[in-house]
C-alpha cells in the first residue's frame, strides 16, 4: 500500500494552516476517490490557501484556477473556438501537420529558408519561395478533400486540466452552468456538437455563502451545488496556541517548503489501490442502519447519494493504512451527507451513535422491530391473521440476528441475549393464542 506520500503531504499542509485537519483530510480523499469538494467559510479562513497548498504537491498535473464572476464566460473556462477550423478552404495547423505530404514539404520550406539565412543568395530565396507555393498547393488540396469539424482550443483551460479550483463558485452566470454541470458530473465537455472527455480528477470550489435555493433566481444553482460530493465548513482559528504558532511561522518565514511531491502517475496508482480496498457486508448493513436513522430524523439522503458512498470510505481506509473499510472510516460521511450546515450536528451524532457500537445498535433496532410487531399483535390478537403476521416478523428478526457478523465474544453474547429476548416475545404470542409453543430456533433451523 503506497499511501506514505499522501499522508506526508497532508502533514506538511496541516503544519502551515491551523485547525484545518478535517479540510485537508477531505482534500486528500477527494483526490484519491476522484470526487468534487466544496468548502464553505468566511473570507480569510485559509480555504484557498489549503487547496492551493495541497495542489502544489502534485507535480506534472495540469491545473486550472479561476475566481468566478458574472462576467466569467465559457471561453475563459473551456477554451475558444479555433476560427481557422471554420473558415472555408482552411484547416488548423495541428490538423494539417497530421498529413505526411504537408509535413514533409513544410520541413523542406524550413530548411530552404534556413539556408537563405546562412548564405543570403537569391537562388536560395527563390527555392524557398517555390517550396512555399508547393506547400500552399498541398494545403489547398488537403482542405478540399478532407472534412474538418470545428475545433476548440482548450490548452490551459478546464478540458486540459487534471485539478480545477473554482473560487466563488456561485457567482457563475447562467450561460456557463450547463457546461459546468456536465463537466462536474460526467467529466465531459460539448462544444460545436463535439463531446470531449475531461481528464479532471477533482473539482474544488469555495464560497463564503450558500445561496437560498428556494429563491427563483438561485434555483438554477442548486444542481451545481449537488455536484460536489464532499462539503466542509471552516471557521476562524479558535485556539490561542494555534494562532500563536502560525503567527510565529509567518514572522520568522519558517513555513515549510513542499518537501513531498506526488507525480500524476503516483496519484493514479494510489487511486487504483483505493479501489481494491474491501468493503465487508457488515459495513453495508451498518450503512443501511445509518441511512434509515438519518431519514427518520428528516435528513434527506437520496438513493444516488447512498449508493455512491463506497469510494469515499475506501479512500478513508486507505489513508488509515488499511485494506478493509471499518466503522471508523464511516465517520468521514459527515462531510458527505449534509446539504445545509444545520444538518451537520445531527448527521455527526447519528454516525457516532451507530459507529461507536454498531453491533449493539443493530441488535437494538431489530429488537425494537420485534417489540413493535408484538404490540401490533396484542392490539389485533382476535384477528386470525395477526398470529401469522407477528410470527413471520419474529422469524425474520431472529434470522437477521443470526446473520450479524461479529468478531468478539462480547458481541456474540449480546446476540445470544437478544435471541433469548426474542424467544420470550414469541412465547407470549403463543400463550396468548393458547397454541403449542414452537421455539424460533427450531423454525429457523428448518429454513436454513
Image (tube, rainbow, N blue to C red):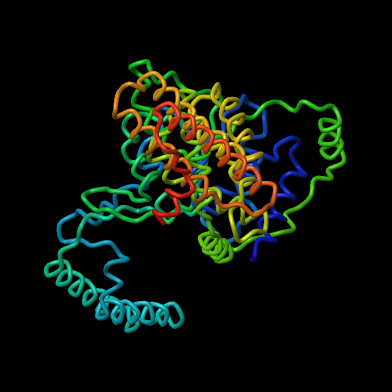
Residue 170 visible: no
Q: What residue is drawn where x is 71% and y is 59%?
A: 260
Query: Going by the image, does 361 lie left or right of 171?
Result: right
Q: For this rendering, which residue is in front, 118 or 433?
A: 433
Q: What residue is drawn where x is 45% and y is 54%?
A: 445
Work out which quarter of the rendered image holds the C terminus and state it.
bottom left
Q: For this rendering, which residue is in front, 147 or 49?
A: 49
The percent position of residue 70, horizontal first and vertical second, equals: 41, 27
The image quarter in which residue 16 lies: top right
Q: For this rendering, which residue is in front, 40 or 297?
A: 297
Does residue 170 sit above or below 280 in this rendering?
above
Q: What residue is drawn where x is 47% and y is 35%?
A: 426
The percent position of residue 87, horizontal first and vertical second, equals: 19, 54
Does residue 129 sit above or below 5 in this rendering?
below
Residue farthest to the left, as pictured = 145
The image quarter in which residue 142 lies: bottom left
Work out which quarter of the rendered image holds the N terminus and state it.
bottom right
Query: Going by the image, does 131 lie left or right of 117?
Result: left
The percent position of residue 175, horizontal first and vertical second, equals: 31, 32
Q: For this rendering, which residue is in front, 277 or 140?
A: 277
Query: Going by the image, does 183 lie left or right of 352?
Result: left
Amino acid at each position: 500500500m503506497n499511501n506514505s506520500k499522501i499522508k506526508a503531504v497532508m502533514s506538511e499542509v496541516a503544519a502551515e494552516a491551523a485547525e484545518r485537519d478535517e479540510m485537508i483530510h477531505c482534500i486528500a480523499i477527494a483526490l484519491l476517490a476522484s470526487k468534487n469538494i466544496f468548502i464553505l467559510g468566511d473570507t480569510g479562513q485559509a480555504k484557498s490557501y489549503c487547496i492551493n497548498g495541497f495542489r502544489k504537491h502534485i507535480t506534472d498535473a495540469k491545473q486550472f484556477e479561476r475566481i468566478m464572476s458574472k462576467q466569467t464566460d465559457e471561453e475563459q473556462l473551456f477554451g475558444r473556438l479555433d476560427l481557422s477550423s471554420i473558415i472555408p478552404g482552411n484547416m488548423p495547423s495541428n490538423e494539417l501537420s497530421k498529413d505526411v505530404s504537408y509535413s514533409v514539404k513544410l520541413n523542406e520550406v524550413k530548411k530552404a529558408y534556413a539556408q537563405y539565412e546562412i548564405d543570403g543568395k537569391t537562388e536560395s530565396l527563390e527555392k524557398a519561395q517555390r517550396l512555399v507555393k508547393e506547400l500552399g498547393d498541398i494545403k489547398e488540396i488537403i482542405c478540399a478533400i478532407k472534412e474538418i469539424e470545428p475545433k476548440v482550443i482548450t490548452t490551459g483551460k478546464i478540458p486540459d486540466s487534471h485539478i480545477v479550483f473554482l473560487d466563488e463558485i456561485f457567482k457563475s452566470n447562467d450561460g456557463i452552468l450547463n457546461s459546468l454541470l456536465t463537466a462536474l458530473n460526467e467529466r465531459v465537455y460539448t462544444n460545436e456538437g463535439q463531446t470531449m472527455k475531461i481528464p479532471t480528477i477533482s473539482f474544488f470550489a469555495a464560497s463564503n455563502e450558500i445561496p437560498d435555493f428556494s429563491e427563483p433566481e438561485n434555483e438554477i444553482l442548486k444542481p451545481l451545488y449537488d455536484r460536489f460530493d464532499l462539503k466542509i465548513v471552516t471557521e476562524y482559528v479558535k485556539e490561542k496556541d494555534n494562532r500563536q504558532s502560525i503567527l510565529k511561522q509567518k514572522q520568522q518565514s519558517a513555513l515549510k517548503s513542499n518537501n513531498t511531491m506526488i507525480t500524476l502517475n503516483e496519484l493514479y496508482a494510489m487511486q487504483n489501490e483505493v479501489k481494491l480496498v474491501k468493503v465487508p457486508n457488515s459495513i453495508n448493513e451498518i450503512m443501511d442502519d445509518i441511512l434509515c436513522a438519518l431519514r427518520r430524523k428528516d435528513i434527506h439522503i437520496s438513493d444516488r447519494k447512498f449508493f455512491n458512498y463506497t469510494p469515499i470510505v475506501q479512500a478513508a481506509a486507505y489513508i488509515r493504512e488499511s485494506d478493509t473499510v471499518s466503522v471508523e472510516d464511516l465517520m468521514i460521511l459527515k462531510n458527505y451527507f449534509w446539504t445545509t450546515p444545520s444538518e451537520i450536528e445531527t448527521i455527526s451524532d447519528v454516525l457516532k451513535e451507530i459507529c461507536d457500537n454498531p453491533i449493539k445498535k443493530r441488535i437494538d433496532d431489530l429488537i425494537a422491530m420485534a417489540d413493535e410487531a408484538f404490540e401490533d399483535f396484542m392490539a389485533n390478537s382476535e384477528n386470525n391473521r395477526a398470529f401469522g403476521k407477528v410470527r413471520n416478523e419474529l422469524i425474520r428478526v431472529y434470522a437477521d440476528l443470526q446473520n450479524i457478523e461479529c468478531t468478539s465474544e462480547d458481541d456474540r453474547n449480546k446476540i445470544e441475549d437478544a435471541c433469548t429476548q426474542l424467544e420470550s416475545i414469541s412465547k407470549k404470542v403463543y400463550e396468548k393464542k393458547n397454541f403449542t409453543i414452537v421455539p424460533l430456533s427450531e423454525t429457523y433451523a428448518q429454513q436454513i
